[in-house]
Image (tube, rainbow, N blue to C red):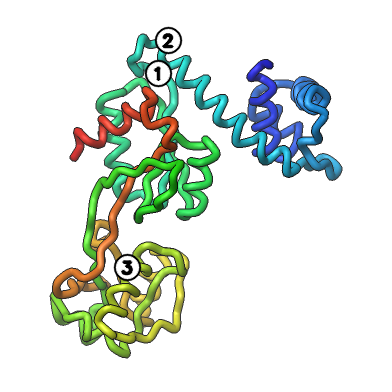
């Protein structure tokens, strides 16, 4: 069966309509419609729910989506091999990441070795980045924290201590380092549940039997910075992610009891692929 039909299927699933899918692929809407109709007729399975012009995947369509993305990823690998005799002179590497820290230096290292390759970065939270990887929307993923799943391969890239930062007028801002016990009853600003920084901090606080005030949960690093700037509490961040600012003072925690680790992931079945191996080799050279 032609992979063009799978490309059309994926485009409709991602764009939500035949017209949008046609525009994204540079094809006519009748062509896309015919390809989807052929898929459904040959399989005798309804792949999409239709509500006017809008189309959404059925349960069978969701299952096919993963297989179709996997098929196209393997097709891309074959094209790389046949076209370049095992060398990457052109093509695209898709990277998923939870934040710009580390991934940009990885991209720079890769670009230095493979200047002809196109690179794209899809940002999202941990769940979205893993979903994209497992559904073959990306080739590799950069995440803070270890996710032990049988279908994934993870390699440690960097480990960083978590530090605090406070407004310059905060009493603790006058000290370069504090014991974790100094956080008892202090207003501590943390990310949403599931954040690796929050998880590491809560574990360190529990081990030291320290109970800060955790009455404000914030969903982004940028929002935490603004909350600290307005005197709403103390922020916690990986030292690699701390951005100096005249409004703040960084504060280390004695003994560095909390840390985060950045890992690079790929699907296990693609760990030996030319594309993924080229990324491993580039970032290993960087380290």
Q: Mark 1 points at which residue?
A: 90
Q: Residue 200 carries which label?
A: 3
Question: Residue at the location (37% across, 50% down)?
Answer: 143
- Residue 276 coordinates in the image, percent (x, y): 37, 30
Contact check, label 2 and label 1, Cβ < 8 Å:
yes
Q: Which residue lies furthest to the bottom in this view?
A: 185
- Residue 269 coordinates in the image, percent (x, y): 44, 32
Q: Is residue 55 left or right of residue 285?
A: right
- Residue 255 coordinates in the image, percent (x, y): 14, 72
Question: Residue at the location (71% across, 38% down)?
Answer: 61
Q: In this view, does 103 lie above or below 18?
A: below
Q: Is residue 190 above or below residue 215?
A: above
Residue 29 visible somewhere in the drawing: no
Estimate the spatial distance between the alpha carbons at disc 3 and disc 2, rounded to whole Å.
46 Å
Q: Please, what secondary structure does the residue beneath circle 1 have? A: loop
Q: Mark 2 points at which residue?
A: 83
Estimate the spatial distance between the alpha carbons at disc 2 and disc 1, rounded to whole Å.
9 Å
Q: Which of marks 2 and 1 is nearer the N terminus?
A: 2
Residue 11 position by quadrant: top right
């Amino acid at each position: 069966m032609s992979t063009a039909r799978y490309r059309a299927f994926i485009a409709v699933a991602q764009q939500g309509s035949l017209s949008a899918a046609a525009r994204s692929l540079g094809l006519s809407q009748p062509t896309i419609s015919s390809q989807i109709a052929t898929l459904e007729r040959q399989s005798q399975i309804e792949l999409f729910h239709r509500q006017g012009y809008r189309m959404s995947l059925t349960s069978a369509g969701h299952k096919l989506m993963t297989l179709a993305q996997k098929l196209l990823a393997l097709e891309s690998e074959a094209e790389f091999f046949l076209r370049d005799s095992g060398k990457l002179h052109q093509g695209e590497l898709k990277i998923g990441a939870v934040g710009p820290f580390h991934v940009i230096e990885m991209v720079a290292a890769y670009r230095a070795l493979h200047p002809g390759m196109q690179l794209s970065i899809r940002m999202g939270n941990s769940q979205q980045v893993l979903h994209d990887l497992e559904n073959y929307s990306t080739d590799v993923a950069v995440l803070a924290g270890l996710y032990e799943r049988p279908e994934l391969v993870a390699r440690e890239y960097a480990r960083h201590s978590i530090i605090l930062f406070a407004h310059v007028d905060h009493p603790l801002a006058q000290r370069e380092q504090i014991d974790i016990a100094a956080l008892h009853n202090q207003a501590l600003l943390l990310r949403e549940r599931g954040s690796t920084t929050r998880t590491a901090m809560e574990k360190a606080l529990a081990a030291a039997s320290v109970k800060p005030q955790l009455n404000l949960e914030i969903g982004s690093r940028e929002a935490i910075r603004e909350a600290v700037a307005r005197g709403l509490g103390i922020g916690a961040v990986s030292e690699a992610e701390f951005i100096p600012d005249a409004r703040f003072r960084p504060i280390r925690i004695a003994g560095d009891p909390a840390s985060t680790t950045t890992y690079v992931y790929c699907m296990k079945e693609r760990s030996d692929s030319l594309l993924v191996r080229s990324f491993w080799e580039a970032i290993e050279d960087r380290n």
